[in-house]
């Protein structure tokens, strides 16, 4: 459809089923319509109302369990959420990708130049360039398109706004030029490749995989080339709880070296033991080796390694609890995971600024309200940003009011687990 035709179709309800397949309920569909229409109008104003357009979506994600394990080939439990990045896109014939994201400059990529450049690390245009290069390297068709995007995945929130953007770009190229045949796993790997090689950020694969695959998903990264992905059969809506993400207001923008240190220190333990990553070493062998590790790696590295092994175990236990309907046991595991992240992985505040501890405060207040009833833990990479809480529905109003009285109105998000990852909506 052309831009105005699609706007009319959305307004008249003709696209409601398409939207509901992504956003789950009628209320969410109605909330999305103004956003879709605004993005369509922006596209028309920039690129022309007579263009044939499509709409793609890629979600943010919430990490449920498996904090800081993926980069050492561990296990994670994650879920896609209703907050997402969307793109209105149209093919062009000039071998150029143009992406205008709301609130940001236009990203322009010449498809004849798809080589990484360290001098451009940190520039969002390199993410577009990297996704195009990664798709091309897989042997798929890569041609030009024009796009307008908008995202309600909060930056620095631990909900992975960058992964949503990267997966969105891969989804666009999959559906626009490859009949939707690029697999979810390949899109996730391309997104990670773009962020690592072109953008210069040493991220793992968790964020991109959860955004690309969608719904509750467990991922075992023992083989990063062939990760084992399994969707978990659990209907969270029947748990009697709400999933809350509390944005404490901290930014992730200057924490790259903190994240890198978690991975690097875990790998330093593995390397002393003759391996590349901790997953290649049994917990028993690691634990026996702790005396010999003294003086060869720092103490924090050993603590973070202990966290890795126990967190892997917790992922398996959390999955068993969900699949058997034992939500109380699941909450116990989430609390244990959060305690380990705080004490062993040590990613609740940055050592660069130890007196600013908004995450610690949010966790402490959450415990006061939810102890014996709900669960709470650091969310995502940590050091700043967000916490996660599983809140009994009868405590939701109290919890939300308490969090927002401290961190600001609108900072406690009550989320929906959406059933699909990166997809063509219209």
Image (cartoon, rainbow, N blue to C red):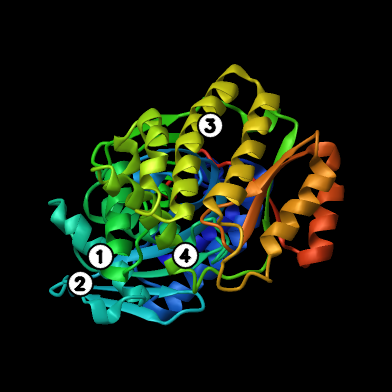
Q: Nearer the viewer, residue 274 or 407?
A: 274
Q: Is residue 72 above or below residue 101?
A: above
Residue 197, labelled with which disc? 1
Q: Nearer the viewer, residue 211 or 85?
A: 211
The reply to whether the C-beta atoms of the residues labelled 3 and 4 are less than 8 Å apart is no
Quarter occupied by residue 55: bottom left
Residue labelled with disc 4:
258
Residue labelled with disc 2:
116
Tell me which numbered mark, 3 or 2, is placed earlier along the sequence.
2
Residue at 32%, 68% in the rendered image: 127
Distance from disc 1 to disc 2, alpha carbons, whole Å, reads 7 Å
Distance from disc 3 to disc 1, alpha carbons, whole Å, reads 31 Å
Distance from disc 3 to disc 4, alpha carbons, whole Å, reads 24 Å
Distance from disc 2 to disc 4, alpha carbons, whole Å, reads 24 Å
Residue 314, labelled with which disc? 3
Distance from disc 3 to disc 2, alpha carbons, whole Å, reads 38 Å
Q: Nearer the viewer, residue 392 or 44?
A: 392
Quarter occupied by residue 234: top right
Q: Picture coordinates of residue 328 (x, y %)?
A: 70, 26
- Dot 3: what SS? helix
């Amino acid at each position: 459809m052309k831009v105005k035709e699609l706007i009319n179709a959305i307004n008249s309800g003709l696209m409601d089923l398409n939207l509901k397949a992504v956003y789950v309920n009628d209320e969410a569909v109605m909330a999305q319509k103004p956003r879709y229409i605004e993005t369509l109008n922006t596209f028309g104003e920039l690129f022309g109302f007579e263009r044939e357009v499509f709409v793609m979506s890629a979600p943010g994600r919430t990490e449920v369990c498996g904090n800081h394990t993926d980069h050492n080939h561990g296990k994670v439990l994650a879920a896609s959420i209703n907050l997402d990045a969307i793109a209105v896109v149209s093919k062009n014939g000039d071998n150029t990708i143009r992406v205008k994201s709301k609130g940001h400059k236009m990203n322009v990529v010449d498809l004849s130049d798809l080589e990484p450049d360290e001098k451009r690390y940190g520039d969002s245009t390199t993410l577009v360039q990297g996704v195009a290069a990664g798709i091309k390297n897989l042997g798929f068709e890569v041609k030009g398109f024009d796009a307008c995007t908008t995202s309600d995945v909060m930056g620095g929130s631990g909900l992975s706004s960058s992964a949503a953007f990267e997966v969105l770009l891969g989804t666009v190229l999959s559906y626009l030029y490859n009949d939707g045949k690029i697999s979810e796993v390949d899109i996730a790997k391309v997104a990670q490749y773009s962020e690592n090689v072109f953008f210069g950020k040493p991220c793992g694969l968790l964020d991109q995989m959860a955004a690309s695959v969608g719904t509750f998903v467990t991922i075992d990264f023992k083989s990063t080339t062939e990760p084992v992905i399994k969707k978990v059969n659990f209907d969270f809506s029947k748990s009697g709880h709400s999933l809350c993400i509390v944005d404490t207001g901290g930014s992730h923008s200057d924490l790259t070296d903190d994240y890198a240190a978690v991975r690097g220190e875990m790998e330093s333990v593995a390397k002393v033991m003759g391996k590349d990553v901790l997953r290649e070493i049994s917990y028993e062998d690691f634990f026996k080796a702790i005396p010999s590790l003294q003086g060869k790696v720092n103490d924090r590295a050993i603590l973070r390694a202990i966290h890795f092994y126990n967190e892997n175990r917790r992922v398996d236990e959390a999955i068993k609890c969900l699949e058997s309907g034992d939500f109380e046991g699941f909450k116990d595991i989430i609390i244990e995971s959060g305690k380990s992240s705080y004490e062993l992985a040590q990613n609740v505040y940055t050592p660069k600024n130890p007196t600013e501890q908004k995450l610690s405060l949010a966790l402490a207040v959450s415990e006061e309200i939810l102890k014996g009833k709900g669960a709470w833990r650091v969310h995502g990479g940590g050091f700043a940003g967000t916490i996660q809480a599983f809140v009994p529905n009868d405590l939701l109003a109290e919890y939300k009011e308490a969090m927002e009285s401290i961190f600001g109105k609108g900072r406690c998000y009550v989320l929906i687990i959406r059933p699909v990852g990166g997809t063509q909506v219209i």
